[in-house]
Image (cartoon, helix red, strand yellow):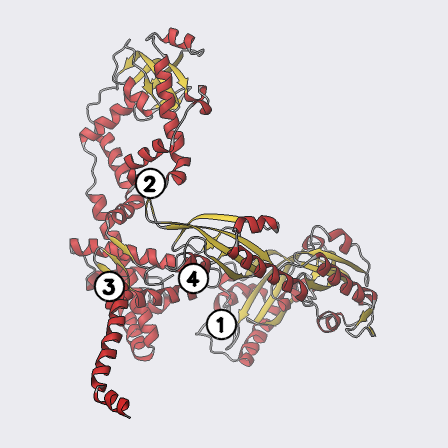
Amino acid sequence: MAVLNKIRQRSLFLILIIALALFAFVLADLFKNSDALTAKSQNVIATVNGKEITRDAFLQKVEIAQRQAGPSATNTQVMNRVWEQEVRQAIMETQFEELGITVEKDQMRDLLRTSLATSPEFLNEAGIFDENKLNEYIANLKETSPSGFQSWVNYEKQIAANALNQNYYNMVKAGLVGTLAEGELDHNLEGNKIDLKYVQIAYSTISDSLVKVSKSDISDYINAHQNQFEVEASRDIRFVEFKEEASIEDEKTIKAELNRYKNGQLVDADGRKNVIAAFSQATDNEDYINSVAASDIKFNNDFLFKGSLSTEFADDIFNLNEGEVYGPYKEAGFFKISKVIAVKQIPDSAKVRHILIPYLGAQSATPEVSKTEEQAKVLADSLLTVLKSDRSKFPDFVTAYSSDQGSVSNEGRYDWHPYNSMVPEFNDFEFEGQVGDLGVVKTVFGFHIIEIEGLTEPKKAVQVGTIARKIEPSESTTDKVFRDASNFEIKAGEGDFEAVAQENKFKVRPVNGIKVLDESIPGVGNQRPIVRWAFEEQVEVGDIKRFNIPGGYVIAQVVAQNEAGLMSVDDATASVLPILRREKKAEMIKDRISSENLDDIAAAEKTTVKAATGVNMKNPTISGAGREPYVVGAAFGLNEGETSGLLEGVKGVYVVQVTKVTPAVKLDNYQAAANRVEQQKTGIVNARLYNALKEAAEIEDNRAATQVQ
């Protein structure tokens, strides 16, 4: 009791001590992660010229862009696209603000008038843009559809942004001129010409094995050209992939099952015989394929020409008699058996014209469609009645009634098109009818009034029924793959990754230079989780992790963590080594040449003296040697008859002698040349201006730090 009383007496003191300890723990964590001291740093993914791009706004735009892009684009691709858009917008807005250029109300009205000049809903009876109709449309959107009104606001912002960009680019172009002095210089660069003789001692005359380039040489070059070798932080990894693929035994099992359908006898799991009619004897082929055999590819009742069948098996299947079965055969990841159900002669192409009458609920029906299905049918039948007595009215009816904008401009006509290119009901009418047939056909798009204008000569076509089984690994195979991956993960974690892989005959794949925002791993595709893991703070060189990927597993190991800065000597060797070799070869060649006479040099180097005529500075190319700017420039510094010293060119060491100098023709006025210079300047604005602004901008990219990946 005495102890309890003492604790109670000191309870306030104890509470204070605990509180201070907790505070110290939290404070230490905050200092460890200073970003946690402010929510701002966690919610700002980038700062561009002082403009902040917030995480929430960015992710909202990514979500919208992802919906627009659909499933074909990965999240990282969409995110990078939005990132570039946001950075561009911030950079350009900085320029607009510094120059004070804006889009005012009157200009906005002009822009909208231009943009919407052909939109029918904003035109009056005379076909002229009516601003009152636009105002009514906007007011109605504001009252009835907040989301629609917001879309309109975004549309106006986009038009304004495009106008500002155009104004800015035009201002830059307006400031670029070609002066008379520039025109004269350009004229002389092209017009001043020289003829010369030269000797080229190619670098290739010295074997690479004779040139020693050390790592310290490469390191010195990197330090002397640091701006060329700055790199982002990266990771090097290696991995082993374990694929869940069907084994030979799995394939044999699938083929055996298909053969039982082909032969008409199945065996159930208990070993009891369950006799089912052979595929060749089936009368309800659709039911047999879809239900009895439960094919992985459902029945298709289309007739096929030989060219529509798989090239490899076309002859085997097309030449079957009705009821005969071919297979099993392997095609596109499936084992199949195929039966010719029917054979008939049909045209392979048709030419038709049609009028489409849609109704409420029909596929692709626009909001303006108000007819019910019954009303649309009545209209189609009445138009058909008129056309049967006067087909000349067809083009007028197309213009007045058809909703198929893809054919209205061609009087409702679809010129020659192949069998099965239209929806089934449309296809059946045109290819089972005769030229001149006219009728109404209902499809998912509405009621079509169709006239057959042409059919090719009938050809043999077959209706093929196929029972297919996807080639997939069995449960025992996937279990084995899982065990192999798990065992490798454990053993590689305990020993040497490479050695364990070699011991088990697993292929190790290295991937170097992965950047923090990459998403693709060569060989396994989009694997963003692997990239994220490789850049986690707690992950160290040598760490191993297993990842589930579509159809298997990847066991990955971090091999190197390369921090941002200068490229390593090993990584830079591929690009620097040829440069240093060339420099060293040039010195070796220069050291062995003592004569200044072209013929003597050519004889000593076992080459010839070559000639080049009409050489100019604008296109510094020497016939027989290629583009050599430095050599040509040096040659233009010589007088006629003068010989140069040893010149280091792109492809070798040169000695040149100028044999003739031809000055450019003097012009009374260089305005035409100045105009060409101006056109050249303005012509590159669109391609280079934004890149120059981006290079000069201050961009702080926090996507990795804020986990927007």
Left or right, 62 with respect to 693, comes to right
Question: Mark 3 or 2 closer to N-term?
Answer: 3
- Residue on which the image places disc 3: 109
Q: Residue 68, position in %: x, y?
A: 42, 64
- Say which element carries label 3: helix
- Say which element carries label 4: helix
**Kind of residue at badge 1:** Ala
**Kind of residue at badge 3:** Arg
Q: Residue furthest bottom?
A: 1
Q: Residue 110, position in %: x, y?
A: 24, 61
Q: Is residue 487 above or below residue 311?
A: below
Q: How much space separates mark 3 and mark 2, taking CA atoms?
A: 50 Å
Badge 3: residue crowd in 10 Å (few <14, some 14–19, many ≥20): few
Nearer to me, 163 or 274:
274
**Image quadrant in which you'd find residue 5:** bottom left
Q: How much space separates mark 2 and mark 1, taking CA atoms?
A: 58 Å
- Split into 4 quadrants, where in the image is the C terminus? bottom left
Residue plotted at (61% across, 64% down): 451
Residue 492 seen by the camera: yes
Q: Residue 268, position in %: x, y?
A: 78, 73
**Kind of residue at badge 2:** Phe
Q: How much space separates mark 4 and mark 3, taking CA atoms?
A: 37 Å
Nearer to me, 270 or 146:
270
Q: Is residue 693 above or below residue 225?
A: below
Question: Mark 4 or 2 closer to N-term?
Answer: 4
Q: How much space separates mark 1 and mark 3, taking CA atoms?
A: 32 Å
- Residue on which the image places disc 4: 75
- Residue on which the image places disc 1: 365
Which of pointers 2 and 1 indicates the residue nearer the eye?
2
Answer yes or no: do the residues labelled 4 and 1 have beta carbons within 8 Å?
no
- Say which element carries label 2: loop
- Say which element carries label 1: loop
